[in-house]
Amino acid sequence: ADVQNSADTRHIAIDKVGIKDIRHPVRVKDRSEGEQHTIANFNMYVNLPHNFKGTHMSRFVEILNLHEREIGVESFKEMLGEMAERLEAEAGHIEMSFPYFINKTAPISGVQSLLDYEVSFIGEISDGKPKMKIKVIVPVTSLCPCSKKISERGAHNQRSHVTVTATTRDFVWIEELIDMVEGQASCELYGLLKRPDEKYVTEKAYDNPKFVEDMVRDIAAALNTDDRISAYIVESENFESIHNHSAYALIERDKEKDQLVDS
Amino acid sequence: ADVQNSADTRHIAIDKVGIKDIRHPVRVKDRSEGEQHTIANFNMYVNLPHNFKGTHMSRFVEILNLHEREIGVESFKEMLGEMAERLEAEAGHIEMSFPYFINKTAPISGVQSLLDYEVSFIGEISDGKPKMKIKVIVPVTSLCPCSKKISERGAHNQRSHVTVTATTRDFVWIEELIDMVEGQASCELYGLLKRPDEKYVTEKAYDNPKFVEDMVRDIAAALNTDDRISAYIVESENFESIHNHSAYALIERDKEKDQLVDS
Amino acid sequence: ADVQNSADTRHIAIDKVGIKDIRHPVRVKDRSEGEQHTIANFNMYVNLPHNFKGTHMSRFVEILNLHEREIGVESFKEMLGEMAERLEAEAGHIEMSFPYFINKTAPISGVQSLLDYEVSFIGEISDGKPKMKIKVIVPVTSLCPCSKKISERGAHNQRSHVTVTATTRDFVWIEELIDMVEGQASCELYGLLKRPDEKYVTEKAYDNPKFVEDMVRDIAAALNTDDRISAYIVESENFESIHNHSAYALIERDKEKDQLVDS
Amino acid sequence: ADVQNSADTRHIAIDKVGIKDIRHPVRVKDRSEGEQHTIANFNMYVNLPHNFKGTHMSRFVEILNLHEREIGVESFKEMLGEMAERLEAEAGHIEMSFPYFINKTAPISGVQSLLDYEVSFIGEISDGKPKMKIKVIVPVTSLCPCSKKISERGAHNQRSHVTVTATTRDFVWIEELIDMVEGQASCELYGLLKRPDEKYVTEKAYDNPKFVEDMVRDIAAALNTDDRISAYIVESENFESIHNHSAYALIERDKEKDQLVDS
C-alpha cells in the first residue's frame, strides 16, 4: 500500500499541502487581442485532514499537464474544482502569476508599444464554493507634493509599484484594474515615448503630485464604487529617488463585513 | 503649514503607512555569545486616521538613527511604543529581518563552524498593547520516505526551508525555535563536515525519512507543547532534487482561539 | 537641436549604452513543436564614440515594437544588424532571456509533462560581423560519490544548476545543449513522475554519482566533440543538501585560441 | 584513499572549483569609525589541474572558520594565499560582498543618518601574485537633461545604481570610491532629510541634470586621474521613472594596456 495512504495518528490537520513554483505556459483573455500567450508560475495546495498521512503530489502536476499545452484561463475555476476532487480534499487553493502585456499608445505622438504588468489569479475553493481574487502590480510614476511645494524648481519623482488585490463577485478585466490604478497615479508609464510625449508625461506628473497616501486613497475610492469587487487590498511602494528606501502605504477593506456593521 | 498636516476629506483611513526596506546595523541577543552584530532590513508602519492627509516619513528614519549606531534588540519593544508616540498613531508595526549565526559542532569530529539563518522580529502595537512574533527560516535536509521505500538503493533528498512564525507570550531564544525545527528534520545542516561527519549525516537522513507533511506536523507537535507560544504558522518548502518545483506544506494554529472553542 | 546629438568634449567613448530589463513576448523555434510562445527579458546596447553626447534610447524600444507582436527568433540576427544601423553604431549587443519548455516523457510509465529551462540568446555585432552565443541553465540531480562511498546506506543528493554558454559557428538546437547536460548528470529532472519512475530516478542517481568537478568535465568533454561550438563556459552549482552553501565549478575554453597555440 | 585524490584521466583542467554563497560575519575598515561589523557573502575558488579528480571542499569552509568569529579584512590578502596553499592550487579567487554603512550629514539641517552601500572585495592570486579589486554599488539620483530642456516645468528623475569595479595598485578607502560617484551624480542620497534638505536636494538635482552617458563618463574621468587605480569598469543603471525598464551605460578601461599602446 502507498505510504501516503496510511493512517496518521498525530491528530494534526494540514492547512495547505501541495506544489510550489512550477511554471507552465498559459493563454490569458485579453480585452483587445482576444487572448495572449504567457508563462505562469503556479502554487497549488489542498488541505489534508488529520487522519491522512500524505497527499498525492504527482496529481497536482497531472492536472497542469492534462489540458492542451497552454492552460486557458477560462478553465481556472474548473481546475480548482478538479484539483479538490482528484485530491479528495474539502479545500483547495491555486495561485497563478504571470507577466501580462498591454499595447499602449503614447499620449501625443500616438506611437504604440507594449508595457508589462505582473498579474496573479488566486482561487480558493471550500466545500465546493469557489472564491476568486485578481492581483495586479502596476508600475507608475509618483511625484512628491512636498518636494514640489517647497522647491523653487523641480520635484523629486520615481517609479512606484501599486498592487491591487481584488476579491471579485463578477468578471473584471485585468485591464479595468490597471486603468483604475493608472488613472490615479501622477502619471502612467509607457515603453516608448517620443520627444513631445516625454514633455507631456514630465509636465503631467509635475501637475499631478501625489503622496503615497494619496495614491492608495484615490485608488481605494475608485475600488469602492465598483460593485463587482467585494473586498480589496491596495498598496503602493515608492522607490524614492532621494532615499535608498521605499515609502509604503496599504489600505484593506472588506465591503461585505462593512455592510454587516453598518446595517 | 505642512502639506502633510492638512485635513483630508476623502474619509478613507490608511491601515499602514511608513517606510520599507531600509537597512541598519543591529546587535541581537545570542544564547551562547551574549550578543552578535548583524545587519537588519526594517519595515516600519503606522495607521493614519481618515482625517489626516499624510504621515511624517522622516520621523521613522529618525527613530532608527536616534540610538547608538547599532540598534540593540532589547529596545525593539521600546521602538514600537516610541514610533507610535512620535507619529501620533494608535497602531504601529515594525519588522526587522536579519541573518543570524550559530556556531555548530559537527556530530562526530566535533569541528566547529557557523551556520546562517534568516530571522525576523515582527512587533505590532495597538492602543498601547504590543504583540510580538519571531520568525525563523531554518535550512535542513529532507529525505523522501516513498523514494526510500520503493527503491532498492538510495533515496532522493534535498535542502528544505522550514519557516516558523511564532507569536510569543514570553521570551523565547531564537536558538530554541531553531532547535525545535532541526530536531524534527531528516537531518540538520552544518557549514563544515569532515569525512566521518558526512557519513553520519548521510546515514542519519536515510534512517529518518520525512515527507513535507511529516516535517510540519512534527514541528507543530513540538510547538503545541510550549506554553510561551500562543500561536504559530509552520511551513516547509522542499526544493525537490528530482523535480524543478518545490513540495510545500503549512499548518497554522492560534491556541487562544482553540481554547475558546474547547471550553 | 537634440541634446543627445551635441558634441562631447570629454574624449571618453562608451563601450555599451542602451536599455536593460525590458520584457517582450517572443516566439522561439522548438525542435518538436515547430515553435513555442514565451516571454523574454531584453538588454540592448550599442557603443558610443567619444565625440557623441548621447544615444537615442527610444530607438531601441522601437526596434522591439517594429515587428509583429511576438518577436520571432529567426529575426534575432537581423535585429542585431538593424539596431547597429538605426543607432549608427559600429558595435551592438543584444541579450534575450526566456523560460523554455520541453515536453518530457517519464522513464518507465511514459507519462508526459513539461519541464522549464532558462535560456538566453546573446548576440554581438562588430563592424557588421555577428557572433552568437546560446546560454542554457539546466536543473539536474547530482549525487555525491564521497557520501555514497563512505556511507553504509544512502547518499546525499540535491538539485543542481548547470549553465552552458556556447559560442556557436552554426545552428544548434536549444534541445541539443540540454541533452548534452542531462546526459552527464547523476539524473535528469521531470515535472511528473509516477511511482515506478521515482524508483528509476532514485536508483539511477545512486548508480551514477558525480562530483561537481565530474559534471563540468563530462559536459566539457561532450562540448569538445561538437564542431559547431567554437568556445564555451560550463558551470555547475550544486545546492548541497547537507550544507547551506553551494559547491561550484567552472571550465572555460576557446577552441580557436587553443588551435592557434597547438599549431 | 580519498575519492577526491584519485587520478583523473579525462585530461580536462578546471578553471574554478570551490564553494559559493556562504555567509560569514566580518569586520571591515571604516575611514571614520575605525571599523564596522557586517555580514559577507563569500565565493571561494581554486583551479584544479587536469590530473586531479577533485578538490577538498571542506578546507574552504575551514579557512573561513579558522580565524576569530569575525573575519578582519586586513587578512583578506592572507586568506587568498592561505587558500591557494591549503588547497595546493596555483590560482585562487575570493569574492566577499557585504552591505557597508556611511554616516551621512544632511546638506542643510546637518542631521545625521546611515546610508547603505553594497561593496565587494575580489581577490585573485596566480603563482603567488595577488590582484585586488573593489566593487561598490552606489545608489544616487539622476535627472534627465532632455526632459528638463523640453518641459516647461519639472523633469523626470529616479534612483540609479552606479557600479564601479576598480583594480587597485594601492590602498583605496571604500569611501573614496563612493565619493567619486556621488560627486558626479545629479544628487547623492540620504537616509534622513528634513524639509530644507529636501528643498536643497530637489533643486540640486534639477540644476545638475545628467544622462546615463554623462554619469559614466564623468566618473570615468575621475577614475582616470587616480593613479592607485590601474583598471576599472563603471556602469550606471537608471530605473527610469517614466518607463518600466532601465537606461544603462558601461565604460571599461585598462590603463596598463592603454599605456603599452601609447608608448
Image (spheres, coloured by chain):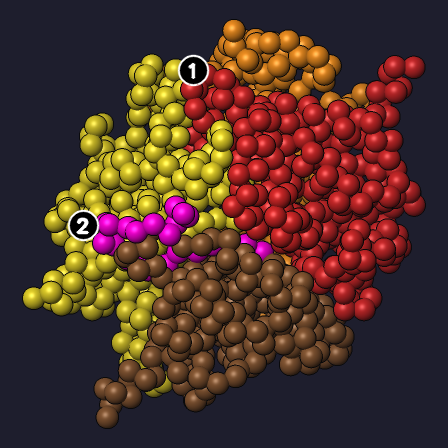
Chain colours: A red, B orange, C brown, D yellow
Q: Residue visible at 28% across and 65% down? A: D46
Quadrant of the image for the C terminus of chain A?
A: top right
Q: Position of residue A255 (x, y in %)?
A: 83, 25
| Magenta residues, start to end | C1-23
Residue at the far left in the pictured view: D263
The residue at which mark 2 appears reads as D224
Task: Give C213 or C148, whichever is nearer the viewer.
Answer: C213
The circle drawn on residue B193 is none
Return the residue at label 1. D195
Q: Examine the structure image and report whether residue B77 is included in the region drawn in magenta.
A: no
Q: Is residue D192 left or right of residue B148?
A: left
- Residue reaching furthest front? C1
Disc 1 is placed on an element classified as helix
For the point 24% across and 50% down, the residue is C9
Q: Is residue B173 above or below residue D199?
A: below
How dense is the environment of label 2, judged by Cα within 10 Å: few (below 14), some, or many (20 and up)? some
Q: Earlier in the sequence, mark 1 or mark 2?
A: 1
Q: Residue A179: x and y, percent?
A: 73, 39
